[in-house]
Every structure is written in structure tokens, then in C-alpha cells.
Image: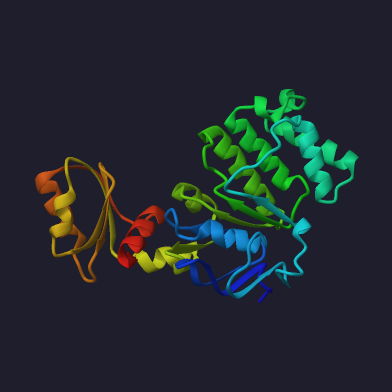
Amino acid sequence: MSEPIIDIRGIVKRYGDFTAVDDLTFSVPPGSIYGLLGPNGAGKSTTIRMMMRIMLPDEGHISVLGSGLAQVDLDRVGYLPEERGLYKKMKVLSLLTFFGEIKGLSRHDAQSRAGAWLERMGLADRALKPVEDLSKGMQQKVQFISTILHEPELLILDEPFSGLDPVNATAIKDIILEYHRKGHTIVFSTHMMEQVEKLCDQICLIHRGRAVLSGTLQSVKKQYGKNGLALRVVGDGSFLRELPEVASLQDNGNELFLRLRDGADPDRVLDAARARLRVTRYELAEPSIHDIFIERVSEVS
């Protein structure tokens, strides 16, 4: 087994009487795309800030790239914070060159790489503009370029898709996959479950500062995937949760996901649905990460 790129053991972070992170343990395998999931206030950003040595845990241990926090070489890490921060008066190309030099690149290499990334991200015509002249979405792309400019071994991205339109979210997703194929490790937090389904090898669901579910995407889905029935319906299907065969129901309007009890006959549930609704599609299916997210948080709340 390869040594984890990130290894977190029993970390605790308190703010006065409030415990933001509570005995949290997980590890990130090398070369993986690892998703930190959880509702607002779960402790994801606090955990990431501790990985980056912005703050230190009150208890527990964190190692990054095989070193404890005091020794970790942060030049090998690319960090995109949740709270974006750029020097608004600087010109875009100068700003990116500056960030590249901070991470150990020569001025020539930093400027060359910045120019290439601006071209790729559709920002070449903004290179000599002050950052403050850019739209919020453009600024987010500049911040992302600053995170990857030095080709870090490890990318830690806090809500990388937040506020991006679908086109730019897809562009960021493609770059993440490109880095993954080259063997880099990516850790990111997100509320966008669709991106988790597409990208992640492993996940950790955090709620109230604790890990409540973790593992490979496949193993998590297998754990929650027994006796799943997906329905697309016209009408109100909420009554189905009262059927004795149904263990739980995720109601997404015209799409329903029902987890059936062990031994339940899905045909009986389908017949009950057809008796009161127009069913346009049905299938035995595994739950989505969104459904698992909602169900697991509800269980532990």
C-alpha cells in the first residue's frame, strides 16, 4: 500500500465552546480525486485550512505529502481557498507571474505559463487589464490559474465550482481530470453532487465536524444501493413513503428514489404508484450521491 498523500487522524478544532471539527479521521490515496462533502457548517473548510497550515488542530495529527504540518513543503501544493483573494489593482498577467514566482518558478517560466493558461481559459485579451475590471467569473478563473500554474503534486480546492456557469464549470472539471491523468492528487470540497459523481474516486461525508460516511464511490453506492427503485412520475408521489415496502423516499418532484426494505417486492410498489400516478420511467437503480447525502445527513441529524 502506498503512503497516503494526506493522512488525518483524530483532529479536533474548537472555537470557544463550539467544536467545528470533532475527532475527524480519513486518508487520501496518491493519484486519487477525493471529495469532501457536507452541508454548510460541516467543517470542510476548517479541515482544509488545517491541511494548509493556516490554522492548527487542537488535537490529532495531520501529515501532507508524507510530512507533518511543520515540515510540509507547501510549494508542492496548489490551494484554491473558499474565500477568493486577488490583488485587484494588479494587471492579470503580472499577478499570475507574481504568484508563479512565489511558488518557485523563474519570472520567464511564470510569465510563459500564465500566458498559455490565459489563452486556454479565454482570457488572453484581459492579460493587461487590472483584476478589478474582470467579472466575478473571470476572476475565479484567474484564481484557479494561480492555483495550478506551478504544476503542484497536490491540488486542494475548496468549492472550486462555486459561482461558475456550466461552461466554465466544465472547463475546470476538464483540467482537474487532466491533472488526475498525469498522476496528480486532487482533494476538493463541493455541494455540487453531480460533479462528485463524475469526478471522485473516494469521498468523505462530514456532518457536524465528524465523518459519517467514507470510502470509494463504488463501495458507498453499494452500501446504499440495495433494493433501489427510481421512478419518473407525473403527480405527487409522496404517499409512497407510507407503503410498508418502502424504507425511505427521496422526493425530487417528478423524480423519486425509493429504497426498499429487505425482501420487498418492487412490483408491488410500482403497482401502487401506477394506481395513482402516471409513471413515465422506472428502473431498479443505485442511489445517486445526492440521495445518499440527503439520507445520511437526515439519519445523523
Whether residue 120 sits left or right of residue 33 in the image: it is: right
Q: Name the spot of residue 183 as percent of width and height, x first.
A: 71, 58
Observer-nearest of 2 and 68: 68
Render colour scheme: rainbow
> Which residue reaches farthest front?
16
> Given the current orientation, which residue lies at the most extreme left position?
275
| In this rendering, position of residue 26 left or right of residue 179 | left
| Relative depth, front residue between 119 and 74 | 74
Q: Is residue 124 visible?
A: yes
Question: Where's the C terminus, which quadrant?
Answer: bottom left
**Quadrant location of the N terminus in the rendered image:** bottom right
Q: Quadrant of residue 71?
A: bottom right
Which x, y percent locates residue 19?
A: 47, 67
**Residue 188 as seen in the image, left or right of residue 191:** right
The image shows residue 58 at horizontal and vertical percentages of 58, 72
Q: How far across and how far down the image is residue 24, in percent? A: 51, 71
Please give the count of numbered marks on the rendered protein: 0
- Which residue sits at x=44%, y=53%? 40
Residue 103 sits above or below residue 300 on the image: above
Please tell me which residue is depicted at 55% across the width and 60% down the height of the picture: 46
Above or below for 27 versus 189: below
Asked whether residue 33 is in view, the answer is: no
Residue at x 46% of width, y 47% of height: 192
The quarter of the displayed image where residue 146 is located: top right
